[in-house]
Image: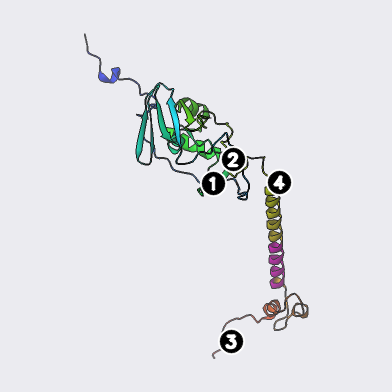
Amino acid sequence: MAIPSPALTSELPQGKLRGANSPKVNVTSMKARGVTTQPEDRLRTRQADMPFLMEHDILKVTNVDNVAWEFGWDRRKYLIQPGETGFIPFPAVVIKMGDPRSAIDVVTRFNSEDGQRGIIPTRHDSLVTLFAHYGISNENVAELVDFAPKLECRTMADDLLVQFPAQNPDMPPWPVPQVALPGRENSDMRRMQDALAEENRQMREELAEMRGLISGRLAGAAPEGHADPQIAADPGDPSGLAAALAGADVDTGPSTQFS
């Protein structure tokens, strides 16, 4: 009986491996764009029953998947086998599951009560990093949800269930301290934003009017060697700069001729 060739008996290449043995991928951060909100320090929207998640917070993570998952943060590795529970830093879970504080089309700046500051990317940018991390093409959200780890994450102090974008891409954002949720801004905050927008509009109009005035003055034709009397007597130009420019002689180069 002939022995089959190894090429014929080799198995077809499998898809991406799930779990701790998945291939390493370098993730390049993207510059986030969107509307930013910066309310006054006296505005507080933090809810007592939903604590704000920060870099030094620890989550109680239970692996309900059928493969082991490894998390990394601050040069440390955390391996959780199926069915086991571990204590993982919040940023390590964000790398695998996305930022639950991210909002749709909004870049959020926060100031914590202990003086810490930070920027939270938009929901799209948070999902884009997950697509790159897991090697998912065409931004396939359904494939991301199937491929991402199956975890149950809870806070340490209050035992609250924390949902991540890899589990539900359309989830509402986790509340951020001193930043109102989209559509729930304080009336004072809206008044400040409207006043700033009106001031910027007036400045743009004044700048456009000034540019048009300067262009009209410089483009006006006047006899050579004589300034326009209307320009010279313009009370809006006390320095006479426009008149000097309008009546200035044009330098045509050396006028001496050699015979």
Say which amino acid is labelled 4: Ser
Residue that mark 2 sits on: 46
The magenta region covers 206-218
Residue that mark 3 sits on: 255
Q: Main secondary structure of the magenta part?
A: helix
Say which amino acid is labelled 2: Arg
**Disc 2, disc 1: CB below 8 Å?**
yes
Crowding around mark 4 (Cα neighbors within 10 Å: few <14, some 14 to 19, many 20+) is: few
Does the image show residue 135?
Answer: no
Q: Secondary structure at mark 4?
A: helix
Q: Is residue 71 left or right of residue 247?
A: left
Question: Disc 2 vs disc 3: which is toward the camera?
Answer: 2
**Disc 2, disc 3: CB below 8 Å?**
no
Q: Is residue 82 left or right of residue 193?
A: left
| Res 113 label | 1
Compared with 197, 162 (above or below) is above
* Residue visible at 49% across and 44% down in the picture: 30
Residue 108, x across and y down, in percent:
57, 44
Residue farthest to the bottom?
Answer: 259
* Residue visible at 66% across and 81% down in the picture: 248
Q: CA distance from mark 4 to mark 3?
A: 71 Å
**Disc 4, disc 3: CB below 8 Å?**
no
Q: Secondary structure at mark 2?
A: loop
| Res 187 label | 4
Q: CA distance from mark 2 to mark 3?
A: 79 Å
Q: Quadrant of the N terminus?
A: top left
Question: Disc 1 vs disc 4: which is toward the camera?
Answer: 1
Say which amino acid is labelled 1: Glu
